[in-house]
């Protein structure tokens, strides 16, 4: 597994006298047993852009084809692993750093890790890409207008953000940096859930991660 150099304090090795251990069963062995290749499908986009909906549908379709996939969802992760993090820029970075490490472990185990996080900063998404390695990280932009996302907002988050109740809300009072060259873009403004899901599955077939 690779590690990226950078200015992240949390990336620095704090514990001493720790050594990386190699094991008799490696990634190739696990992938052979599971008959699939481990990878990370990284869905990114504004709140309400359809990330969780499409991610769950993709996982369901992969399962029906005999593939083992696991969805790491933003809200769910904040109930456990990242429950001590807020939404400041620093906490957002740490949130994505932790989930990147988890997704990388899942991929190393031979699973298809599917993440559904706003992940607003390119640098953070690139960290996961470099961690997992080229060819095993598929960045998927869920493209939807801010107007559409606000209309879909069943939790009323955008309304609270515009009223100043929620601070540092992506798209309103905090930035979102769109991917410049994602492996795939799905336009959830115009596509149905099935159409977007099928585009993701087709992409996986094209790169020979799954087959019919």
Image (tube, grey):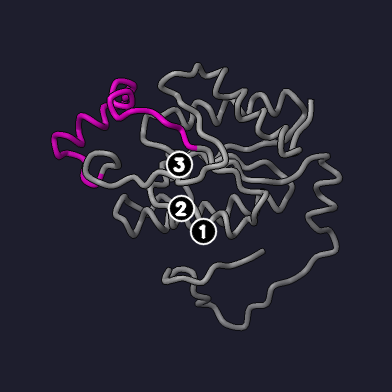
The quarter of the displayed image where residue 16 is located: bottom right
Q: Residue at x 66, y 28 (%)?
A: 201
Which numbered circle lies on residue 149?
none
Q: Is residue 189 left or right of residue 131?
A: left
Category of crowding for the residue at label 1, using alpha-carbon neighbours closer than 10 angstroms: few (below 14), some (14–19), many (at least 20): some
The quarter of the displayed image where residue 145 is located: top left
The quarter of the displayed image where residue 34 is located: top right
Q: Residue at x 72, y 32 (%)?
A: 205
Location of the C terminus by quadrant is top right
Point out the stretch of residues depicted in magenta. 141-168
Category of crowding for the residue at label 2, using alpha-carbon neighbours closer than 10 angstroms: few (below 14), some (14–19), many (at least 20): many
The x and y percentages for residue 162 are: 17, 34
Work out whether mark 2 precedes mark 3 in sequence or the reverse, and give the earlier one.
2
Magenta stretch encompasses residue 44: no
Q: Residue at x 45, y 55 (%)?
A: 124
What is the secondary structure assignment of the residue under circle 1? helix
Which one is in front, 201 or 158? 201
Q: Residue at x 52, y 51 (%)?
A: 99
Q: Which residue is mark 3?
A: 117
Which one is in front, 183 or 64? 183
The x and y percentages for residue 111 are: 70, 43
Cβ atoms under marks 2 and 3 closer than 8 Å: yes
What is the secondary structure assignment of the residue under circle 3? loop
Which one is in front, 41 or 23? 41
Q: Is residue 72 above or below residue 54?
A: below
Cβ atoms under marks 2 and 1 closer than 8 Å: yes
Q: Which residue is mark 2?
A: 96
Q: Which residue is mark 1?
A: 127
Q: What is the C-alpha distance between the residues marked 2 and 3?
A: 8 Å
Q: Is residue 153 left or right of residue 33?
A: left
């Amino acid at each position: 597994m690779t590690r990226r150099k950078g200015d992240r304090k949390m990336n620095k090795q704090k514990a001493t006298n720790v050594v990386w251990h190699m094991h008799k069963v490696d990634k190739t062995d696990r992938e052979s047993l599971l008959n699939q290749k481990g990878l990370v499908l990284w869905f990114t986009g504004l709140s309400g852009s359809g990330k969780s909906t499409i991610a769950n549908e993709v996982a369901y379709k992969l399962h029906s084809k005999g593939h083992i996939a696991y969805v790491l969802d933003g809200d769910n992760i904040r109930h456990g692993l990242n429950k001590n993090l807020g939404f400041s820029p620093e906490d957002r970075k740490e949130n994505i750093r932790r989930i990147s490490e988890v997704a990388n472990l899942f991929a190393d185990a031979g699973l298809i890790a599917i993440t559904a996080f706003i992940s607003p900063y390119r640098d953070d998404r690139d960290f996961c890409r470099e961690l997992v390695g080229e060819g095993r990280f598929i960045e998927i932009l869920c493209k939807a207008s801010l107007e559409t996302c606000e209309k879909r907002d069943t939790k009323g988050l955008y309304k609270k953000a515009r009223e100043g109740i929620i601070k540092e809300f992506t798209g309103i009072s905090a930035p979102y940096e769109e991917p410049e060259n994602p492996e795939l873009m799905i336009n959830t403004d115009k596509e149905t859930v099935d159409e977007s899901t099928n585009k993701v599955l087709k992409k996986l077939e094209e790169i020979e991660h799954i087959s019919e």
